[in-house]
Amino acid sequence: MKKTIGYNILFLLTGFISFFVYSSALYSQQPLIQTDIVRIDKTKTIFPIQDYPQDTDRWIPENNHYHTPFMNSEQQSSAFKALLNHYFGQNSGDLSPWNKNYISTALGSAGVATKKLSKYIAQFTRSDSRHYGENFLLLDSGWKKQIQHLASIAITEEYHRTSRGIVLKETAVRLLPTTYPAFGNPSQAGQGFPFDMLQESALHPGEPIYIAGITQDKSWSFVISPSVIGWVESSDIANVDDVFIQRWISMARASLGAVINDNASLVDSEGIFRFTARTGTLLPLKTVNGKKIVAIPVKNKQGKADIYYAPLSENAIHQIPMIPTPETLSLLIKGMQGKSYGWGNIYGHNDCSAEIRNLLLPLGIYLPRNAHEQSLSARNVDLSHYSTAERIDYLMKHGKPFTTLIYIGGHVMLYIGNIDWKGQTVPATYQNLWGLEPADASSRSIIGKSVFFPLLSRYPQDPKLDSLAGKSIFIMTWLN
């Protein structure tokens, strides 16, 4: 999955408010239909997700714990402080792209930026690399030579204040400076479309960045963000100066808002559309005449960002951190559920780690952009040596709803509690999932969107499919 700047979030483990696992019996009260598998080709089928009803209120029912926080105030305060420092922190040890101390360590020949740049170029341009273009043809030596020339920029060792920037609209982060794809072998399961191997992630509007280098034609910029390092189109970012940064950080620390409806249209006070933002976008809020408005970055004629303001819709943007209750999480999920799977945020959609990261940001919880790094971001236990049944049992007994991650190697999901499924108590998850596969990984049964899904030892629609709880890796991580 996506590579990230490693960052461990420290949560206070004392004073934890116990949150009991609840069980919903709604699914045992009605017969479940079993639908036939639909085949696309020899490596792809459509998994009948309609056999698993997707009503959020059934999976997160209104019960005695519905309005009870699953993190105490001390834990959430600690998490939110870590988030603010990661985006805006100016002290030693803060990993903000606007922090001179952090950026200075990332630059130069030994810095992470240079290492990643060299790695990306080598990965796709060495003589034995085999990737395919949008026309199903191999990317040849001519393509490799051209992209190597474009991407081979010098990253200076010196920190430059004028290289600080901000994202103006949601923008793709690429491993190389091109919008064209590089696919794996399209004849193999899990390769080809939509898995563009050059797609690293996406950045939200308003994210701080440091511009480490620019292509000779200035069309692409190699940037360091709070979560990833890679190439973005230069037209989607702008430089910022001390005055901008001071105002932006001051407003953000006083009142920070998060987009919560996954499709917010930001129109400034003059009626000009600026960008569309998705859940997890963080923007400062300001109170004017008793009403809150949202700050947005807009590029001026000199190529620098100015601060404009847009009216605030409470249904679109909410001040954070939001109260961490099942009710709040249910509200957020309803705005995200059912959206298509997007490898590396391609086409504006989430993959597994982006789904959970963007879901929890409105609660003030920062997570890395990579599934494996998320599993290492807090206290965890590796149950890979357990059997499938033992893993499921351990999760049901020790998992904490809404704050327990399950990492299974290249994929991560959020545990939401236990449910009664056809007379059997099983753990339930929320996840953005491409699909299931058999033991030999020769095919994929595609789900392709964000769904509620039980962890079963087998799936009756196709017993040959591996259980998600039966993968070679199984790590549980407690965020509280």
Image: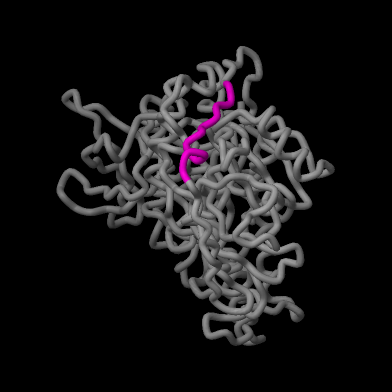
Q: Image quadrant for the N terminus?
A: bottom right
The answer to whether 126 appears left or right of 164 in the picture is: right
Above/below status of 338 relative to 216: above
Q: Specify start and end residues of the magenta stretch as a single range.
A: 20-30
Give the answer, above or below, for where 25 lies relative to 444.
above
- Which quarter of the picture shows residue 43? bottom right
Determine the image quadrant of residue 17: top right
Residue at figure coordinates x 72%, y 35% from the top left: 393
In the image shown, does 217 or 4 lie closer to the viewer?
4
Residue 357 seen in the figure: yes
Looking at the image, which is closer to me, 211 or 472? 472
Q: Is residue 23 magenta?
A: yes
Image coords of residue 422 (percent x, y): 57, 42
Residue at figure coordinates x 62%, y 55% from the top left: 2
Q: x, y (%) of residue 406? A: 66, 41
Q: Is residue 90 visible?
A: no
Give how far across and how far down residue 462 sits, in percent: 64, 62
Whether residue 21 appears in magenta in the rendering, the answer is yes
Q: Is residue 305 above or below residue 379?
A: below
The number of numbered badges drawn on the structure is 0
Q: Position of residue 413 (x, y in %)?
A: 60, 45
Residue at the extreme top? 15
